[in-house]
Image: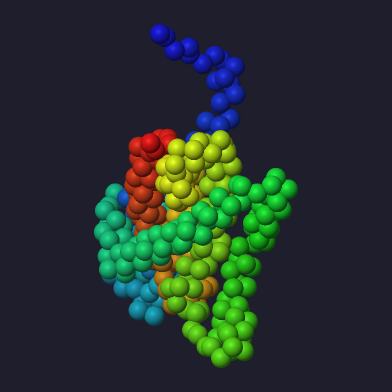
Amino acid sequence: MKTAKPGWGNRLLNAPYILWAAIFIIVPLIMVAVYAFTETANVFCLEARYKGQTYSYEIEMYSGKILKGDPGSFTLDPEMEGNVNMDYAKDMVAKCLGAERSEVTFTKAKPEYNRVSSFTFANIRTAFSGNYVRAFGQSLWLSVLATLISLVVAYPFAYALSRTSIRSQKIQMLLIMLPMWMNMLIRTYAWTDIIASGGILNKALGFIGLGPFKMLETEGAVVMGMVYNYLPYMILPIYTIMSKIEPSLLEAAEDLGCNGFGKLRRVIMPLSLPGVVSGIIMVFVPSISTFYISYKMSNGKITLIGDLIETQMKNQMTTGGLNVGAALSLLLMVIILICTFILNRVDKDGEGSVMV
């Protein structure tokens, strides 16, 4: 039996989505890969005339490394290393030519940013160095822990929610989504005051003779921040799937002799597996790549891979961090894709069917 080919109408309707995917998914991925496997330089491009001759120079910003042009007998001033500006770059060119700056005419002097140079594996090797590997490991551990806690909390709540009245479901869903209307930065910052040594929680514990406990600046605080911010993403897909489970299936399971645990194991869990997999992916992906939550909940004492990527991107002008950050992002994407593939295989093998 031949499969009907999509008509021109369907193709035209799909065109905006294909264009969106190309612009916001494929192109950024290609850019990340290019920067991850190349070196880039932020350079001063200068063209100078001296004694009737034209000379071209490219000098790396801040570091003062001469990428193009004959350096002659020029030696970089140690005090200027890492702080080279355009004015000093012109002095460098004049000294390279063995002249005074007043004797040189600059016909071109402008900065050029992020010039891609040679292919290299150096950024990938840097990403596999000690500090980065530890950050990857800690990010993976804390994100898995946050995902498991979110699943344990969300699963029974989603089931109970799916079995209440429609009115109650609407009210509870509103309460779940209400914190999401507030900026995540504000929500996270509020928790730092709640769990601080002199915060509301420790003061409340003090009234009953407990504490104060050190909760801030710990891995537990970071995990709590992840769970608080991403728990709705676990609840929603599980609730959506569970709300579609027909009550007649549970009644049939009871008629066949299933107790409460039997219904959970043989009916509810298999049918809710697609929602569980979706929830795990939706919590795990932002958790492993988070950076603000870890920084704020630990006062910068716990550094995850997202924090390192942010730092590299901020320092791109001075340390080539753009390339290392891209390499870290590429490896992070590989980890996420592997975990997503494994979870999708679990979902596919389960097929959401009732166990008999």
Q: Position of residue 267 (x, y in %)?
A: 46, 41
Q: Does 130 appear above or below 333?
A: below
In the image, what residue occupies the spot 70% across and 45% down?
Answer: 166
Query: Which residue is nearer to you in this view: 254 or 33?
Result: 254
In the image, what residue occupies the spot 59% across and 42% down?
Answer: 243
**In the image, 345: left or right of 257?**
left
Q: Position of residue 347 (x, y in %)?
A: 40, 40
Q: Position of residue 281 (x, y in %)?
A: 45, 49
**Quadrant location of the C terminus?**
top left
**Quadrant location of the N terminus?**
top left
Q: Residue furthest bottom?
A: 209
- Is residue 124 visible in the rendered image? The answer is yes
Q: Residue furthest top?
A: 1
Q: Does 204 appear above or below 293?
A: below
Count the numbered circles shown.
0
Q: Position of residue 335 (x, y in %)?
A: 35, 52
In the image, what residue occupies the spot 59% across and 17% down?
Answer: 9
